[in-house]
Image (cartoon, helix red, strand yellow):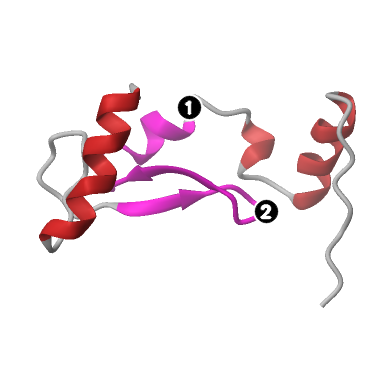
Amino acid sequence: MTDQELYNDMMRDFDGPTLCGCGSGEPRFALNDVMGIFCAYVCDQCEKEKRSHYKPCTFGSVDAYRQNALDCGEDIEPEDY
């Protein structure tokens, strides 16, 4: 998604019900990774395609996500609630 498309997507929030930017005409919803971090706005029509741009561990288990982060040189500590 280009910066302009992202900006247009964000600005639609102020115009009432927001439709997905893919052109399907369906309402959008936030696609978050397994840690709850926002990835993209999607609808039922485009969710699979948008997910395909991420590694499978992004939406899989927390352990696989953390291992991928470690493999990339980042350490994600568990949150204490």
- Is residue 64 left or right of 30 when viewed as pictured? right
The answer to which quarter of the image holds residue 7 is: top left
Q: Position of residue 60 (x, y in %)?
A: 67, 45
Which quarter shows the N terminus?
A: top left
The C terminus sits in image quarter: bottom right
**Pick the front one: 11 or 21:** 11
Q: Which residue is mark 2?
A: 35
Amino acid of disc 1: Ser
Q: From mark 1 to mark 2, how far is it between C-alphas?
A: 18 Å
* Residue 48 within the segment the image draws in magenta: yes
Query: Measured from the top left, where is residue 3 in percent x and y?
Result: 34, 25
Note whether 80 is above or below 26 in the view shown.
below
Q: Secondary structure at mark 2?
A: loop
Q: Residue 12 vs residue 44: left or right? A: left
> Residue at left 39%, top 35%?
48
> Magenta stretch?
29-51
When the figure is inspected, residue 64 is found, relative to residue 34, above or below; the finding is: above
Q: Nearer the viewer, mark 1 or mark 2?
A: 2
Q: Which numbered circle lies on residue 29?
A: none
Amino acid carrying label 2: it is Met
Magenta stretch: residue 77 in it?
Answer: no
Q: Residues within 10 Å of mark 1 (few under 14, many from 20)?
A: few
Vertical arrangement, residue 80 with respect to residue 28, above or below: below
- Badge 1 or badge 2: first in the primary sequence: 2
Snapshot quadrant of residue 78? bottom right
What residue is disc 1 on? 52
* 78 relative position to 42: left or right: right
**Marks 1 and 2 close (CB-CB < 8 Å):** no
Residue 76 x %, y %: 85, 46
Estimate the x, y position of residue 79 in percent, counting from the top left.
83, 65
Image-quadrant location for residue 59: top right
